[in-house]
Structure formats: structure tokens, C-alpha cells
Image (tube, rainbow, N blue to C red):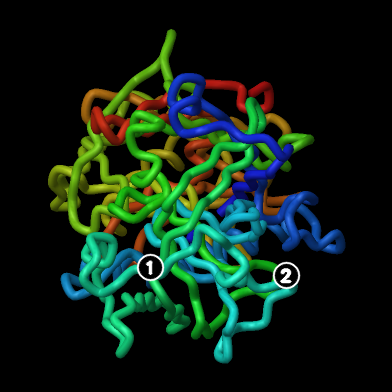
């Protein structure tokens, strides 16, 4: 979880229906987890310290992916709580009750803590009270909604109970329920989603931060917010991530429906590959070129859908053998001598100078060649050091992280099953 923060603010009282949203599309604000707009912001930390913290969360997230992607018994995608780079403000119920939660493209079920909550983690904001919402209802064990989610159980009074477990042994348990969800918009009035499936947590424990109150699922599974928006957004959403060293890196936008279409000059697209778990957005990596040298990914023993893209992971993780070849090719084209990362987190670092320039790196997905810049491939971790953002994975998976996605408009089309990239100055979006 992975991440910068998504914040959807309710800007006004009036709202629009899903039908109108489908016609016009809408956009919402994305806020980085450690930016001044986030409750996680610590003004005493330097930008380098915040970046280091994001790296540590990125590495911690690996245990989640290894357990989730490659364990056939995992009931659903789970994320590392309180490690997300993105947050999201939405409202639940009638009248709307605003909550702040971790948002993740690597998770499906949206849940929040609810009253009564005898076994809840401490949170700063009030708990959602389902009794005060005129549109709230619990789903029964034999309901269609209950059948959409794995790992459910049935209570004595025939209510559908969900259970989610996380990589650090944190858990959430409660009633699978339906209610009206309201999403704020930066481009139009708030959008109302009636009868949205979510988890009403009554027994939650672990390393969750008290500044948040749950999870917002933006993955590809059947109960995710994206899937529930469905035809109203024609399966389309996109975002544009600003570089971490931009003067104003606090926010950008996530776009839905017609606003989420990525088109025009420079767009390249690759197929989204459906795999289990459906939560993750899998794509196929064929090779990476460093300068004129093409390094085939076949050497890693991979197949179709061998990488998934994740907004919540900072690094890009590759199999160790392939990553070693990549580092060798990169370092051979840089005149300076590498220096060690004092924390031994990153695999390739150099002394920073204003004239530092990385070699041209092109990522070859099926049908899409994505040319990266120095902003995408190297990041400053101190006044003295700049380091490569590709890292050898200790698990049996590969993740295309968020630093290599910066200054690209990244578009997901879950109906046409495509993922698109368009080089863009995201600071101007």
C-alpha cells in the first residue's frame, strides 16, 4: 500500500447523479501522503527524510505482495495498513458523513470503522454511525453482494460478515453493508453513488494510524470502488503524478469517465491482463533498453501479465538477476563511480551534481514503449546522493512503481482492458 494521497473533497451541498457523471466525467484531487495537505505531514522532516520513509514503506509492502499475489488461498487482495502513499476523503450515508481513509489501487474492499466498535483502533475523527444513515443496510448471507467477496462468514442473525487480514497481521472485521457514497469533484458538483458496497468495521486492530479511519479500494476486483462505478465511468480513470522534487508537489488529480480518457499525440497503450487476484492491474513487460542495449525480460522466466502497476509502491521492483543486468547497463553509461547507500536500501547511487544525467531508459511493454527521463529513474535521497529507483525484489513478483509513473498521464480502461501512458507535465494538470 501502497503511496501519495488521494483526497476527494465534498465541495458543495448539491450533487450530480451517476448518469450525469457518465456524460460529463469528473476529477478529484490527489494529495501526497507526506504533503502539507495530509494529516501525516511532519513539518520537522526534510524532503529527503520523507522520501526515505516512502522507500521504507515501499520495501515493507513487498511482504504483502508476495503473500497476496502468489498464495492461492488468499481470499482477497490486502494491503499494509498505514503504509499508503495516498489518502482519500469520501462521504458515506444520508446525510453524508465524511471519512478519511487510505486509498489504494492494490485493494478492493472499501471499509471504515463503525459504531459500535468495542475492538477498534484509536482514530481522531468520529466513527460512522450506521443508525444515523437513512440509506444504510446490512447485507444478508444469501445476498448477491455477499457472494461477491471471498472470506465472508454468516452471523446468527443472517448478516454477512467480512474479514480482511494484512501483511503485518492487522485485521478488519465487520458487516458487509450498502449505503450511499458521495465523491467530491474538482470539476463539477459531488457525485452520488447509491447502494455502494462497503465494510462497516466493528473489530479492527493493528498498525493503522489514528488520523485515518479505513481503506478505499481502487483495485480491479468486483467490490472495488472502480468496479462499482462501472458503466457510469465507462471503466475509465486516470491520474498524473508530479515529480517528488517539484516546488508544489502537494496535489494533482484523479480523473473518472470521460475526464479519464488518455488520448492525443504521444499516447502508447498496452493490454491489461486478467489474472488472479483480479485486484491488481497486470501488464506484460517484454524488455528494458538502456541506451542502445535491449535487455529481454524473458531471462526472468516470465510470461503474460508478468508485472503489475501500483500507485502505492515507490520503487520499481524487478527479479534480482534481471535487475543486476539493468544496473550493469546503467552504470556502464555513467562516467562517475557509484557510491554505497549508507542505509543499504538502494542498489545504485552516485554523488549528486547539477549536471548528473541518467542514460536513456525505455520500458518495452507489449505494444507500448515508455521512454523514461532522469526524473523517473533517479531520485535524490540527500544533498549528496542520487539513486536509481529500480530495485531487486526479494519476492517472486515485479512491480511498476510510482516514481517511474511521474510526469505521465496514466489511464486505465477496464472495459477495453488497456493501460495507456502519455508523457505530460503533471505540474500543469
Whether 339 is drawn above or below 12: the answer is: below
Whether 179 is drawn above or below 240: the answer is: below
Q: Residue at x 34, y 45 (%)?
A: 227
Q: Residue 189's x, y, as percent? A: 64, 31
Please state the total of marks drawn on the protein image. Answer: 2
Q: CA distance from mark 2 to mark 1?
A: 24 Å
Element type at mark 2? loop
Q: Which residue is mark 1?
A: 78
Q: Residues within 10 Å of mark 2 (few under 14, many from 20)?
A: few
Q: Residue 101's x, y, as percent? A: 59, 61
- For the view shown, which residue lies furthest in the right direction? 44
The picture quadrant where one finds residue 344 is bottom right
Q: Residue at x 42, y 49 (%)?
A: 225
Quadrant where the C terminus sits is top right
Q: Residue 152's x, y, as percent? A: 28, 76
Q: Which residue is mark 2?
A: 125
Nearest the viewer among 408 and 102 is 102
Question: Considering only order in the chain, which callout, 1 or 2, is on the residue closer to the N terminus?
Answer: 1
- For the view shown, which residue lies furthest in the top direction? 265
Tell me if I can see residue 422 in this picture.
no
Q: Residue 304's x, y, as percent? A: 15, 43
Q: Residue at x 68, y 22 (%)?
A: 428
Nearest the viewer among 429 and 403 is 429
Nearest the viewer among 274 and 62 is 274
- For the view shown, which residue lies furthest in the front direction? 134
Tell me if I can see residue 425 in this picture.
yes
Nearest the viewer among 225 and 345 is 225
The picture quadrant where one finds residue 262 is top left
Q: Nearer the viewer, mark 2 or mark 1?
A: 2
Q: Residue at x 59, y 53 (%)?
A: 86
Amino acid at each position: 500500500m501502497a503511496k501519495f494521497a488521494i483526497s476527494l473533497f465534498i465541495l458543495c451541498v448539491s450533487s450530480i447523479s451517476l448518469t450525469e457523471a457518465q456524460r460529463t466525467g469528473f476529477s478529484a484531487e490527489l494529495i501526497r501522503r507526506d504533503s502539507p495537505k495530509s494529516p501525516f505531514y511532519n513539518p520537522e522532516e526534510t524532503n529527503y527524510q520523507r522520501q526515505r520513509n516512502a522507500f521504507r514503506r515501499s520495501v515493507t509492502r513487498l511482504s504483502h505482495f508476495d503473500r497476496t499475489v502468489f498464495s492461492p488461498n488468499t481470499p482477497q487482495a490486502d494491503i499494509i495498513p498505514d503504509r499508503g502513499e495516498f489518502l482519500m476523503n469520501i462521504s458515506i450515508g444520508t446525510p453524508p458523513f465524511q471519512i478519511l481513509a487510505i486509498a489504494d489501487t492494490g485493494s478492493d474492499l472499501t471499509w471504515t470503522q463503525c459504531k459500535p466498535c468495542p475492538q477498534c483502533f484509536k482514530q481522531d475523527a468520529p466513527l460512522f454511525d450506521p443508525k444515523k444513515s437513512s440509506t444504510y443496510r446490512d447485507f444478508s448471507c444469501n445476498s448477491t453482494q455477499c457472494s461477491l467477496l471471498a472470506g465472508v462468514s454468516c452471523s446468527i442473525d443472517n448478516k454477512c460478515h467480512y474479514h480482511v487480514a494484512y501483511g503485518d497481521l492487522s485485521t478488519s472485521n465487520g458487516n458487509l453493508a450498502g449505503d450511499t457514497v458521495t465523491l467530491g469533484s474538482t470539476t463539477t458538483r459531488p457525485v452520488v453513488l447509491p447502494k455502494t458496497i462497503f465494510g462497516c468495521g466493528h473489530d479492527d486492530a493493528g498498525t493503522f494510524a489514528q488520523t485515518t479511519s479505513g481503506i478505499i479500494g481502487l483495485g480491479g476486483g468486483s467490490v472495488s470502488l472502480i468496479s462499482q462505478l462501472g458503466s457510469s465511468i465507462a471503466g475509465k480513470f486516470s491520474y498524473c503524478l508530479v515529480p517528488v522534487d517539484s516546488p508544489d508537489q502537494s496535489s494533482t488529480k484523479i480523473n473518472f469517465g470521460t475526464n479519464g480518457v488518455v488520448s492525443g499525440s504521444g499516447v502508447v497503450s498496452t493490454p491489461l491482463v486478467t489474472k488472479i487476484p483480479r485486484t491488481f492491474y497486470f501488464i506484460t513487460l517484454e524488455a528494458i533498453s538502456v541506451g542502445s542495449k535491449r535487455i529481454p525480460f524473458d531471462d526472468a522466466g516470465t510470461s503474460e501479465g508478468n508485472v503489475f502497476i501500483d500507485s502505492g509502491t515507490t520503487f520499481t521492483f524487478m527479479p534480482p538477476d534481471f535487475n543486476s543486468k539493468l544496473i550493469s547497463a546503467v552504470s556502464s553509461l555513467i562516467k562517475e563511480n557509484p557510491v554505497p547507500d549508507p542505509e543499504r536500501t538502494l542498489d545504485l547511487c552516485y554523488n549528486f551534481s547539477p549536471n548528473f544525467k541518467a542514460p536513456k531508459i525505455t520500458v518495452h511493454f507489449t505494444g507500448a514503449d515508455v521512454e523514461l527521463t532522469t526524473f523517473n529513474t533517479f531520485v535524490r535521497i540527500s544533498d549528496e546522493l542520487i539513486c536509481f529507483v529500480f530495485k531487486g525484489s526479494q519476492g517472486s513478483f515485479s512491480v511498476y512503481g510510482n516514481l517511474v509513473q511521474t510526469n505521465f498521464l496514466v489511464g486505465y480502461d477496464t472495459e477495453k482492458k488497456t493501460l495507456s501512458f502519455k508523457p505530460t507535465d503533471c505540474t500543469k494538470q
